[in-house]
Image (cartoon, rainbow, N blue to C red):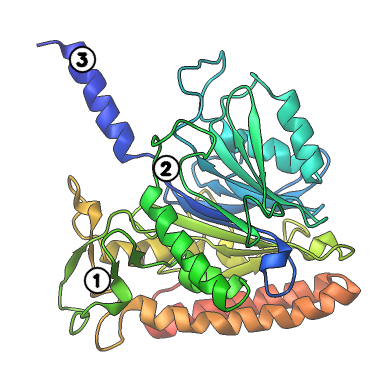
Amino acid sequence: MNYKVLLISIMFAVSVSEIPACTSAVISGKATEDGRPLLWKHRDTGFHKNKLVYVEGEKYDFVGVANLSDSTNAEIWMGSNSAGFAIMNTASYNLNSGRTCDVADDQEGLFMHKALSECGSLEDFEELLRNSSGKWGLAANFGVIDANGGAAYYETGYYEYKKYDAHDSEIAPKGYLLRTNYSFSGSEDDGYGFIRLQTTDELFRESSSVSKLSVELLLEKGTRNLNHSLLNIDVNSMDLPKDIEDTRYIPFRDYVMRYNSASTMITQGVLPGEDPQTTTMWTILGWQMAALVTPVWVVSADLLPDILVSKDFQPAPLNRVALELKMRCYPNIRGNGDDYLNLAPMMNQQGTGFAQILLPKEQVIINKANKYLKRWRKKGISEKKLRQLNNWLDDYISEIYADELDLKL
């Protein structure tokens, strides 16, 4: 037996099963209900423990999502800075075909850390990309918005990038662009996420034909999309289990939601002339069916909600309980067990599933935050009022988990 060939085969099988698989959108202001651009990333990763971090950058400070295991916060996977520049990525698996580079691969998190620290606009980011040719191990679709209304994807490989502008009516007739885990400029039919892109495209097409796109839509139907476009199955329309004890496994592969879904950030930009500091990061720090959204702003390290902050290298409280609830749906993850979800703890006929209890509470958070935002957009963010809002968020969300699910944050 050729053990070298066997080892390579095993490594390939493992790598395919652990491929990061994200779903995302770049939305220009002309497609949104309030004229502000939106940047959405639904993060899928083998690093399920995520944390929210505040970083003092070389030029700009920023807030972003990092892996809990990253003790120095060197890699940022989505975030926004004090200039109102925001960035995220989806890994692309059809770029750099047949090419090699003298640096290590998978440097997207390091690169986004640098971009948030140094870039204040799309033009700054493009300059960074030009100066980075051949110096970074990149294969990604970078989504970017800025405080000037800019909104674009940059499909980026080792040596070049291609820009797709959400304001370009030829490629984005409705003012938005979508990406999963392949690039439109890459090798045809290679990559991953074709079904997720189709599912999300159907949602956006249907929704945008009725009304403008919004944060609420991305939260409720985008990141928590339970429709499978290829199989024409919507979990929301299934015959649900009778109660929480009525074990009912369903195949759960190639949905936007999946076992490896770890966090979401929807960055809501500003109108031209508005204070970039009011750029809002609507953050779900954990498995999205089990974690409530928490809005954050780039002000200072001590002005983040406590439930999103990791202390003593432990998961942030909201991240911890979301993971605990998720695992009730995945009691058997041996082999390919993570492709099968026990629906009963999440949704059932009695309405006692954790998603049925938690998610309706989210609108209260959105309404509360928008009341503060309305004032801040006119007068600037008040640190006193932000601390007040953070305290309310900590208390409100903690009480829901404690009173409704007997879980302590």
Name the image quarter holding residue 329: bottom left
How dense is the environment of label 1, judged by Cα within 10 Å: few (below 14), some, or many (20 and up)?
many
- Would you name the residue on which mark 1 appears? 343
Q: Are marks 2 and 3 in contact (CB under 8 Å)?
A: no
Tell me which numbered mark, 2 or 1, is placed earlier along the sequence.
2
Give coordinates of residue 390: x percent, y percent: 67, 73
How dense is the environment of label 3, judged by Cα within 10 Å: few (below 14), some, or many (20 and up)?
few
Q: Amino acid at mark 2?
A: Pro
- Element under disc 3: helix
280 in relation to 396, above or below: above
Comparing 320 with 375, the one in front is 375
Comparing 197 with 390, the one in front is 197
- The residue positioned 18% from the left and 19% from the top of the image is 6
The quadrant in which the N terminus is found is top left
Residue found at the far front of this picture: 170
How dense is the environment of label 2, judged by Cα within 10 Å: few (below 14), some, or many (20 and up)?
some
Comparing 138 with 14, the one in front is 138
Give coordinates of residue 257: x percent, y percent: 38, 60
- The residue positioned 74% from the left and 83% from the top of the image is 371
- Element under disc 1: loop
| Residue 409 in view of the camera | no
Q: Amino acid at mark 3?
A: Val
Tally the numbered discs: 3
- Element under disc 2: loop
- Would you name the residue on which mark 2 appears? 20
Tell me which numbered mark, 2 or 3, is placed earlier along the sequence.
3
Res 5 label:
3
- The residue positioned 31% from the left and 87% from the top of the image is 351
